[in-house]
Image (cartoon, coloured by chain):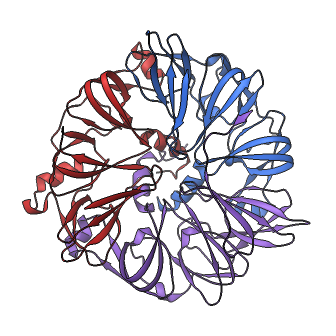
Amino acid sequence: MPTDTNEYETVQGADQRDFEYRIECKPDFAYLTVQVPAQQTMKIEGSAMATMSTNMEMKTKMKGGFGRLLGGESIFINEFTAQGGPGEIGIAPGSPGDMEHQYISGGQEIFLQSSAFVASSMGVEVDSKWQGFKGFFSGESLFLLRCAGQGDLWFNTYGAIIEVDVNGGYVVDTGCIVAFTSGLQYNVTMLGGYKSLFFSGEGLVCRFSGQGKVWIQTRQVGAFASWVWPFRPPPPKNN
Amino acid sequence: MQTSIEGGNSFAFINVDLDPGETVMAESDAMSSMAADLDMTAKFNGGFFKGLAKKFLGGESLFVNHFTNNTSGPRRVTLVQNTPGNVRTVELKGQEYCLQPGAFIACTPDVKLGVKWAGFKSMFAREGLFKLTVSGSGTVWYGAYGGLLEKEVDGEYIVDTSHLVAYEPQMKLNIQLAGGLFSSFFGGEGFVTRVEGKGKIIIQTRSLSGLAGWINPRL
Amino acid sequence: MQIEITHRPGNAAAKVHLEAGESITAEGGAMIAMSEHLQMQTSTHKRDQGSSILGGLKRMLTGESFFLNHFSAQSAPGEVILATTLCGDMMEYQVGGPALVVQAGSYVASAPTVDMDMSWQGFGKALFSGESAFWIKLTGSGPAIINSFGAIYSIEVNGEYIVDTGHIVAFEESLNFEITKAGGSWLSSMLGGEGLVCKFVGQGTVWCQSHNASSFGQALGPMLRHQ
């Protein structure tokens, strides 16, 4: 019957966590499987559920604690509860790439690009209204989320993840920032003068300073949108 | 025939080294490169698909390419699917196996391809109402967008319809709503497949519809 | 200069470590992160040759961005991380032997000592639109970074070998080639979905990508938002 071919890179969650989890098919098509204890609930980004045991009950919350306001992006967060016993749920984001788990506790904050949110336990608060980000992504239609509280946070990338420990300074293209910890200051600027802004293709960059971690992704959604643009189907004909 | 799957798990491709006289069959446009003196003929697959419109086949073409080695030494053809992702094989020894249309890449000549009604009672199955059955004896290569994971089911399990790739024929599939009526549509999950029985299923860790859903807001 | 390519073959990125005084030229949009003290200059071609509009226009036609960026580490070493539009593989190629002809869109970066020639017209109008019709010839010496959609695999041609046109990444200029039909007849070629293929003749290396970007785009197309 079916034969196994390749070995995958699988990470069994071994760091501090509330729920048992494993991440398979790293680093290109990372897939998260979470074991949800009986009567417990977790939050999952709309339409990311791929498989689940039949006792998982899904409820959709409007906004679910944070809103996504951008043209068509899902503003629904689904809450899945394991009824009558433990359950299992498999989660697949839409973009190809990697996934990372961080356990938030003790006043830590992680700032996350909005489309990178995959799932979290109920104790993690996710806030999109923090004003500190004004102007951060001008030109990119992305928002930053502030994640704090206590619990598991899973986020994904488009492309592979590179984790950078910043100690002093670092420059990152704004479309490649996935997440960063508090303790870093940042400054969004152009790189190289006005001529470069228009013609370099680099757009805006973010200069980080201070001490902390930045997660960057090796692909940019804007470039993919431009590439895919010519393949769109023609407008439907009116009768 | 010597074959190997290269390219890692994300861009898996198949190297088929044909001995003199051997043939391998592959879906349309699967050839990436090949020895110049291999013969390639497109054969109409209509006997199996009986004139069904292409859109019901979930992307399978009406033609299958036959690559034949009519030389006196081994020759290579390199085959690939149209999306990035992993590739798996199934060795058939007379039994049947079920694939989502679109998952088929290539097979050895004694494998029979057929299309069957997938048995869904609902008209809303997003992935199409048909399944591809492979039977006979030989090797079948199949794949999908994303990584491929095997899951043992004993009882019942829910799979989002765009993530199910292959399953053993004794498994029963049914369509149901993901949650309540509001949740199913606004939560983005819509309809899901309920798999019942005892056997193995193969799921894909990404889907083209998920990818489109991710990029559409930015178009 | 040291180049480290990570996350092959799925989402490859290139970490380029520059010593003080070194620089690297990369296509517009390829930089994803860099050390804070690196300088970037934009030009249409090589930095010392000034802004040639013609050079920039040629590059726009190849499907490459209009301009090139030059990253340099002035007084201290630094790093720049480069990546590309689509998921895929990357490789480092040492230019120096036979000239390398690279598919438009597969060029990522090269040392300033590598020359880029946009006027290579070997395929002429033989390829259908949908496949890139422009190619870049690399000569000179030094490292170059090439990317692909799919895993990169090489074929040592000794005689003849056929590669589907959408799967060619780069090849040594010493090879001859012929655009031809894939099957025994034109009908087979078209119905079989293969269309035109490239038959390489002679001796040399061809680098292929396992997958075909326009096939992927066409598979995804029907699910995208309408125009």
- Give the quadrant of the N terminus of chain C: bottom left
Q: Residue at x 32, y 70 (%)?
A: A203
Q: Is residue C32 left or right of residue B13?
A: left
Q: Is residue A66 left or right of residue A236?
A: right
What colour do you see for chain A?
purple
What colour do you see for chain C?
red
Q: Nearer the viewer, residue A155 or C196?
A: A155
In the depicted structure, whether residue A120 falls above or below residue B213: below
Q: Residue at x 57, y 85 (%)?
A: A109
Quarter assignment of residue C71: bottom left
In the depicted structure, whether residue C177 falls above or below residue B159: above
Q: Is residue C129 left or right of residue A233?
A: left
Pinpoint residue A60: horizontal percent, then vertical percent.
74, 69
Q: Tell me if residue A198 can be seen.
A: yes
Pinpoint residue B115: horizontal percent, then vertical percent.
71, 26
Count of residue discs:
0
Q: Residue at x 50, y 34 (%)?
A: B80
What colour do you see for chain B?
blue
